[in-house]
Image (cartoon, rainbow, N blue to C red):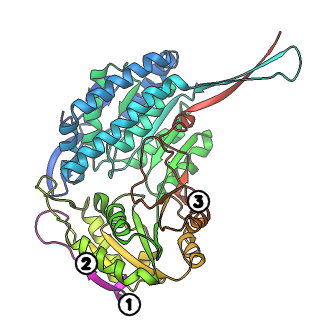
Amino acid sequence: MLKTQAYINGKWTNAESGKQFSVLNPATKKEIAQVSDCDEKEIQQAIESAHNAFKTWKNTSAGERANLLRKWFDLMIQHKDELGNILALEAGKPLQEAIGEVVYGASFIEWFAEEARRAYGDIIPGHQANKRIQVIRQPIGVTVAITPWNFPNAMITRKVGAALAAGCTMIVKPSEETPLSALAMAELAEKAGFPSGVLQFVTTSNAKLFGEIVTASSIVKKISFTGSTQVGKWLMEKSAGTLKKLSLELGGNAPFIVFDDADLEAATDGALASKFRNNGQTCVCANRIFVQEGIYDAFVKRFTEKVKAQKVGNPFDQGVSIGPLINYKAVQKVSRLITDATDKGASVICGGTLIQGEGHFFEPTVITKVNATMEIAHEEIFGPIAPIFSFKTAEEVIEKANDTSAGLAAYIYASNYKTIYQVSEALEYGMVGVNTGMISTTVAPFGGVKESGFGREGSKYGMDEYQVMKYICLEV
């Protein structure tokens, strides 16, 4: 299942230029494979193929689309171990976590296989006696998914599942850091029997060129992007010329708020799970941990004990819970944030340094005495650093938590329901976890507000992003 060619119009395709790019194992820094580095010709070919395929795919029945998606889901589950191995190899996730992502990713295909049959419209009472008003939902057309490296399976499936279920065709551009998981899924999609051009995977190291071509194309009607706020804004600007529909899931700066009346064990477990999932390289992980004064010392002590107990190492080694960072650039970033914080008075309670040897391994780190002057208070960390702030009142922490341009996810731990409702409703975020550090699920809408973007993925709302609403007025 280790494919190295792009998948365009139902064929495994080399770049005509002959160019390839390397995919490296972040745990060893060694090359895994050389992958086709597509250029303008292959990108345009994918767009044309998607356009031609849409002419027939949009007219297939919901049942036909559902059955193909279900076959794809079944194949993913059958091959979850192989998919997990590929994911762990290129992304550096501990193997069991990688397999868990594959199962989670497959759940979106299963969900949208079922939702394909539920693209309901409406009959509206006419405004005149001889008028009949009908509202129907139709697929928007050719769509594009641009996905990041941190969830190389699930970030794709939750976009593709909704698009294909709605009757759209889709071109996926996976991250050049982790294209092998995407190509393995393409192999299974081919086996499932999707028609040529319906689902394509274009691998390229030139993300800017890909973005320029798809945003300029009048054929492409919708782009779904997960990544940085800076790139999301660029895509939005470039898409203005053709007024494309966009879904943007951008950067986060998640507050994790622990009140005095919280269950200490549950709160520290939740913070550990949220902060160190995928080594802190998730857009919804705890970025700023706020703990009320009355429980602050006890929280820091217990949380630090649990952080120290984590095993860092090769994703395939037994008992490893934290793998490597994705690349050296990520190592440099977390090192810079720690240096800036300590220069301004913060204390490193544990961790804080690069682990010498093969791979991009960094010690899981806890920092206290953190304040708003530090870069770590405002910048998305995307690494294994847990900065812990203290606060006195709910009003104070709400103001601090909302003091960011990001608005993706937030977390609260408390027992008092008045506090829970007051704070969860006041937080300016698209998703709030209460007494849980894990909020991602197929059945709930995933997305943010403010500069974390717009649009929702998953849930019954997920197909809305790939449909247009048509009103039909009939005079009888």
Magenta region, residue range: 341-361
Tell me the number on the disc at residue 135.
none
Q: Is residue 361 visible?
A: yes
Residue ID at (22%, 72%): 363
Q: In terms of secondary structure, where does tag 1 sit?
A: loop
Q: Tell me how far mark 2 sits from mark 3, CA to CA.
A: 31 Å
Q: Quadrant of residue 387?
A: bottom left
Question: Is 132 above or below relative to 14?
Answer: above
**Residue at the spot x=28%, y=50% of the render?**
177
On screen, 363 above or below 249? below
Q: Amino acid at mark 2?
A: Gly
Instruction: Specify the amino acid type for callout 3.
Output: Lys
Can you identify the residue that label 2 sits on?
352
Q: For mark 1, does the 10 Å Cα neighbourhood hold few (<14), some (14 to 19), or many (20 or more) residues?
A: few
Which residue in the protein does label 3 denote?
A: 450
In the picture provided, is 49 more to the left or to the right than 31? right
Image quarter of the N terminus: top left
Q: Are marks 2 and 3 in contact (CB under 8 Å)?
A: no
Query: Which residue is under mark 1?
Result: 345
